[in-house]
Image (tube, coloured by chain):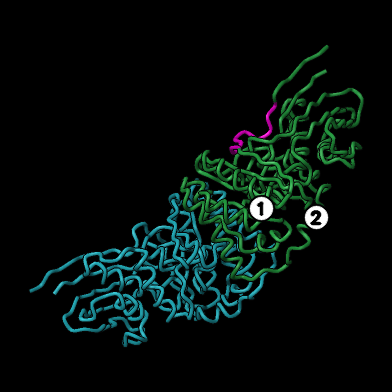
Chain colours: A cyan, B green
Amino acid sequence: MKTVKVLAPASVANLVCGFDVLGMALADPADEMTMSLSNKPGIRIIHEDAYGLPEAAEKNVAGAALMAMMKELDPSIGFTLRVNKCIKPGSGLGSSAASAAGAVAAANALLDDKFSTDDLVRFAMSGEKLASGVKHADNIAPCLYGGITLIRAIHPLDIVRLSFPDLYVTVVHPQIEVKTSDARQILRKQVLLKDAIRQWGNIAGLVAGFMQKDYDLIGRSLEDVIIEPVRSILIPGFDDVKTRCLEAGALGGGISGSGPSVFMLSVEERTAQRVREVMEDVYGSLGIDYKIYVTRIDEKGVKINEVLQHQ
Amino acid sequence: MKTVKVLAPASVANLVCGFDVLGMALADPADEMTMSLSNKPGIRIIHEDAYGLPEAAEKNVAGAALMAMMKELDPSIGFTLRVNKCIKPGSGLGSSAASAAGAVAAANALLDDKFSTDDLVRFAMSGEKLASGVKHADNIAPCLYGGITLIRAIHPLDIVRLSFPDLYVTVVHPQIEVKTSDARQILRKQVLLKDAIRQWGNIAGLVAGFMQKDYDLIGRSLEDVIIEPVRSILIPGFDDVKTRCLEAGALGGGISGSGPSVFMLSVEERTAQRVREVMEDVYGSLGIDYKIYVTRIDEKGVKINEVLQHQ
């Protein structure tokens, strides 16, 4: 039986001013999965973590992604997937995207790369649909491609990989629950044109800043006048964390995806560590449990770690 | 008496998906100006063109820009400015910006580059305020810096010069009047969030396309779901011109500034010439007079052509 092990990275969607269109993969944390081809048709999912996620394929994010892929495959193929989730569901760090992207990337490796990476994005979005009710690729695309990706459009899919300079990422996940679907519902359906103009000036600046490796421009462009003012209300300590992280030398940052995680970018590791201390202090003072990662941008996307051939 | 001659280029603001934040300078047309320092305080403006523009400094776009500059100068200085406008006022090709930017650049050359280019942008915006009621820099910045510029913000001013590949520009100016102030008034104050997301995906794609020299990405990103559907109604033949120019091989394009001029980008000169033929055909059939330019992106901004020292 052919078996692959994969690591599917966490990711930060939106990147402050790029709501629904920008995403960045993280070197840490990552979900661990093992997948085998099976002669028995169907999808079997076993969770080795303790999050109590549903294992029936149609109710499981990885399962929904695999089911979308199966529609374009010989129906006699079957998969067995073992998942050890290290990205906590509901963290705002692309946990569902890692499940979906990791599963379809694993299956594709078992199928000798039958599908393109864009195909995998398409399949994995069915997992996101199950998780949040909306097909979006701002976690899926960086998770599969690595690095920082622009999802210019999803109909038809148009993913652009952006170059970027060395950066450290500090992420705090306060252990409170913010559901992606709730975080979407509180957004206004209409926005002021003047705010939209400011936002597209910022995303244009952020893209130029990444590509020109202009740290100051990246910092100035990490401003969100539309989503953050609404969603940050759901995150205790947000304003305090942000203000103090900037004072500690972070370039900028904001809500990771729909939250509650908050990320900050820094040019140097020692700054990223100071940012970690600030985050510890804020959430320690608030008496809210938290988990912090000081990490880099993952450049490869889902990693296929091992292919074993058994009799 | 010290005298300079300057050429101030036309410019295309917005670049379809970058309303109020992107602009591009054109090699042709350009306004011609001659400026002399004078011992007599005050600003004297003489128009050598036949557009009947006011010559009193406070009512003249170049004059308003110079008056903003004079606030930071020795009050005993005077300027005499002769202007031959080759960019027709009201064309949507940055005519007022060329007047304002050319005047302050000329004055700065006479003052041995006392001010930075960002200072000149700031002064010239006072000319735009007089022309359209709003301080904006999406024509001023490319006119002064050349090339393609992002105006990420104007308070404080944050201008980013973008790299770009070889491109030909075809511009048609149908001889009808669209006032910038009218073109602003018909815009909605609020836009749908989903449209804004599409727009910032497009501007991010356009910036990445320019910088990666990816012609296809530039073409796909030249889409405006917010401004063009409203403003194009003011421009006869717009949909027909756009559809047929794309069929003729143009990468994409749209309204130049607030119109009525329409521009198209092409990779090759022969395509840009085919686009010209299409434009001629459409406006010829409609019985509307027009002027067409087939040109390049100007890379230098306002050109100081000559400095003469008289006794």
Specify the quadrant of the image occupied by residue B183: bottom right
Up the image or down, B217 lies above or below B274; here it is below
Give the percent coordinates (x, y) of residue B113.
72, 28
Q: Position of residue B21 (x, y in %)?
A: 65, 52
In this picture, is A69 found above or below A115? below
Give the residue drawn at x 71%, y 30%. Answer: B7
Q: Is any part of residue A142 visible from this angle? A: yes
User: According to the image, label 2 marks what residue?
Assistant: B181
Mark 2, Cα crowd under 10 Å, few <14 / some 14-19 / many 20+, is few
Q: Residues within 10 Å of mark 1 (few under 14, many from 20)?
A: many
Judge left or right: residue B39 versus residue A114.
right
- Of residue A125 and residue B82, the one placed in the foreground of this image is B82
Q: Chain of mark 2?
A: B
| Residue A249 in view (yes/no) | no
Quadrant of res B236: bottom right
Q: Secondary structure at mark 1?
A: strand
Whether tag 1 and tag 2 are in contact, CB under 8 A, the answer is no
Residue drawn at point x = 23 percent, y = 75 percent: A35
What amino acid does circle 1 point to?
Ile
Task: Report the span colored magenta.
Answer: B295-304
Say which residue label 1 marks: B255
Q: Main secondary structure of the magenta part?
A: loop
